[in-house]
Amino acid sequence: MAYDDTNIFAKILRGEIPCNKVYEDEYSLAFHDINPQAPVHVLVIPKGDFVSMADFTASAPAELITGFFRAVGKVAEELGLVEAGYRTLANAGDNAHQEVPHLHVHIFGGKKLGPMLDSHFSGS
């Protein structure tokens, strides 16, 4: 899938749409999700044109990959989530319900989180 530079995260990175910023460095931007699914729900996006984790890990320079994942950890630490625990999630593609075609990692925390997947999975 080709990168669409009109997606909302591209616009946020360019400063065309505001966000409630939590963290920013040369590799990434982290901000509060506008539709939080937990008391703490932050998105971390890399600075670059990457659709998914597969695209990012295949195409991004090593320095950006390292910087991005360090930022995810730093954000969790700065939000005070490390001791109690938190969840990270990166959806990729239609089956995973990726809504914005720009790689993003969700950080969820602030409460005891339920099971990751539907417990009624039948394997079909």
Image (cartoon, grey):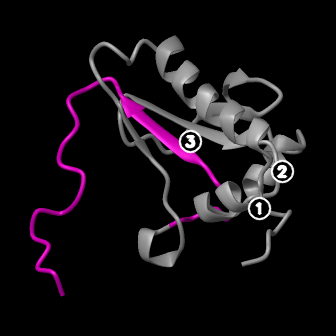
The spot of residue 97 in percent (x, y) is 46, 69
Q: Residue at x 14, y 73 (%)?
A: 121
Question: Is residue 102 among what the camera can see?
Answer: no
Magenta highlight range: 98-124
Q: Categorize mark 1 by other alpha carbons within 10 Å: few (<14), some (14-19), many (20+).
A: few
User: For residue 28: magenta?
Assistant: no
Tell me how far mark 1 sits from mark 3, CA to CA.
15 Å
The quadrant where residue 81 appears: top left
CA–CA distance between discs 3 and 2? Answer: 15 Å
* Mark 2, secondary structure of its residue: helix
Residue 103 % position (x, y)? 64, 54
Quadrant (top left/top right/bottom left/bottom right) for the C terminus: bottom left
Question: Which residue is the site of mark 1?
Answer: 7
Specify which label sits upstream in the sequence, 1 or 3.
1
Residue 47's image quarter? top right
Q: Which residue is mark 3?
A: 34
> Mark 3 or 2, which is nearer the eye?
2
- Circle 3/circle 2 CB separation < 8 Å: no
Q: Main secondary structure of the magenta part?
A: loop
Q: Secondary structure at mark 1?
A: loop
Q: Are marks 2 and 1 in contact (CB under 8 Å)?
A: yes
Residue type at numbered disc 2: Lys
**Is residue 105 shown in magenta?**
yes
Relative to 108, residue 103 above or below = below
Q: Which residue is mark 2?
A: 11
Is residue 49 depicted above or below 106 in this figure? below
Q: Is residue 58 left or right of residue 85?
A: right
Percent x, y of residue 122: 11, 79
Q: CA distance from mark 2 to mark 1?
A: 6 Å
- The amino acid type of the residue labelled 3 equals Ile
**Residue placed at 45% from the left, 40% from the top?**
36
Task: Choose mark 1 or mark 3, whichever is in front.
Answer: 1
